[in-house]
Image (cartoon, rainbow, N blue to C red):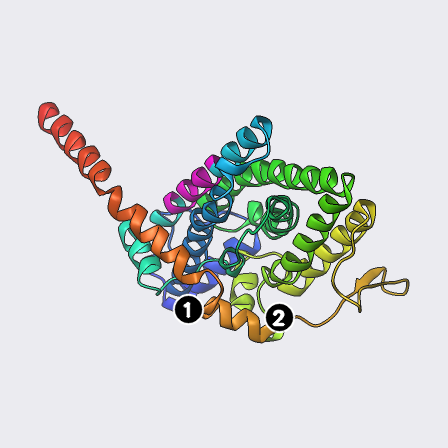
Amino acid sequence: MANLTPQDQENKFQEKIDANLYIEPKDWMMDRYRHNLIRQISQHAHSEIVGMLPEGNWITRAPNLRRKAALLAKVQDEAGHGLYLYSAAETLGISREEMINQLHTGKAKYSNIFNYPTLTWADIGAVGWLVDGAAIINQVMLQRASYGPYARAMIRICREESFHQRQGFEIMMTLSNGTKEQKAMAQDALNRWWWPSMMMFGPNDKDSPNSADMTKWRVKRESNDELRQRFVDRVAPQADFLGIKIPDEKLKWNADTQHYNFGEINWDEFHHVISGHGPCNRERMEARIKAHEEGKWVRDAAAAYANKKRSKAA
């Protein structure tokens, strides 16, 4: 494409996307496409890593060995998801060190949902059921994203997220079928996690600054509002099955649309949290920076070992 005009290059690029062909790392791509992918994939990676923190808080306090083993496996999965995604982003020409520095300095964002505290064991169930459930709905379409490394990373991530969602629902079902106090814990967790989970899909379509381009480039296949509606339609019957009530007085099945109606999200809270002022923003960043600094000796040792091997090979 070197002899083509910039406009011809863009046209060829879009034609390839419209033909449902992958864009690969060595292919020509628009600068805006590369920039937006780096933003989205790195934010996704940061969310997986930061998302380990609220759940890791309950590993030593899980109610039995089975629950502890399952939670350990889930947190380990999330570390792996972060690795896959950082690796995918690196193929776009940004280093992992730069991405992590952007996170630590506040330049890069992560999902607002992880700035809320896990106060009881029921929260681990709600996070699995609602947060991972929302993640699956949001991420299934990314298995068909136009950028090859991102799409391929999402295949395994989605498979593992489905286990996490089922694990969370099973915890909520156990609590809902338990004592009066346990059912109250499940209801309390749903009350606190419902609206933050609804926010996970991002702003309404009319207010989402990047959605139009990402849809045109087929990184996203469905809009924020479409995905949010699917989440509500899927979760509302599950809540009825559990015998607990979603905290939305406007939630009602609409026979005409064949979807649930639901209330308005508090977007002021969304912007407050994502701008760094949520209940746990400072705590999450302090924990991540501390872990990064304390792990420096591991990175140094790995680099020294790699350099030694290269010297011997030379």
Residue furthest to the top in view is: 312
Image x and y of residue 195, in percent: 65, 63
Asked whether 81 falls inside the magenta stretch, the response is yes
Instruction: Provide the major secondary structure of the magenta segment.
Output: helix
Element at label 1: helix
Image x and y of residue 290, in percent: 30, 50
Q: Is residue 149 above or below residue 94?
A: above
Asked if marks 1 and 2 touch (Cβ < 8 Å), the reply is no
To which residue does mark 1 refer?
7
Q: Nearer the viewer, residue 165 or 144?
A: 165
Marked residue nearer the N-terminal end (1 or 2): 1
Q: Is residue 281 above or below residue 177?
A: below
Element at label 2: helix
Taking the spot 15% from the left edge, 26% from the top edge, the residue there is 309
Which quadrant of the figure contains the C terminus? Answer: top left
Q: Amino acid at mark 1?
A: Gln
To which residue does mark 2 refer?
205
Which quadrant of the figure contains the N terminus? Answer: bottom left
Q: Nearer the viewer, residue 64 or 153?
A: 64
Image x and y of residue 192, in percent: 64, 59
**Dot 1 surroundings within 10 Å: few (below 14), some, or many (20 or more)?**
few
Taking the spot 70% from the left edge, 37% from the top edge, the residue there is 170
Taking the spot 50% from the left edge, 58% from the top edge, the residue there is 111
Q: Amino acid at mark 2?
A: Asp
Judge left or right: residue 262 versus residue 149: right
Task: Name the front one of labels 1 and 2.
Answer: 2
Taking the spot 41% from the left edge, 60% from the top edge, the residue there is 39
Q: Is residue 59 above or below residue 254?
A: above
Q: Which residues are magenta?
A: 76-87
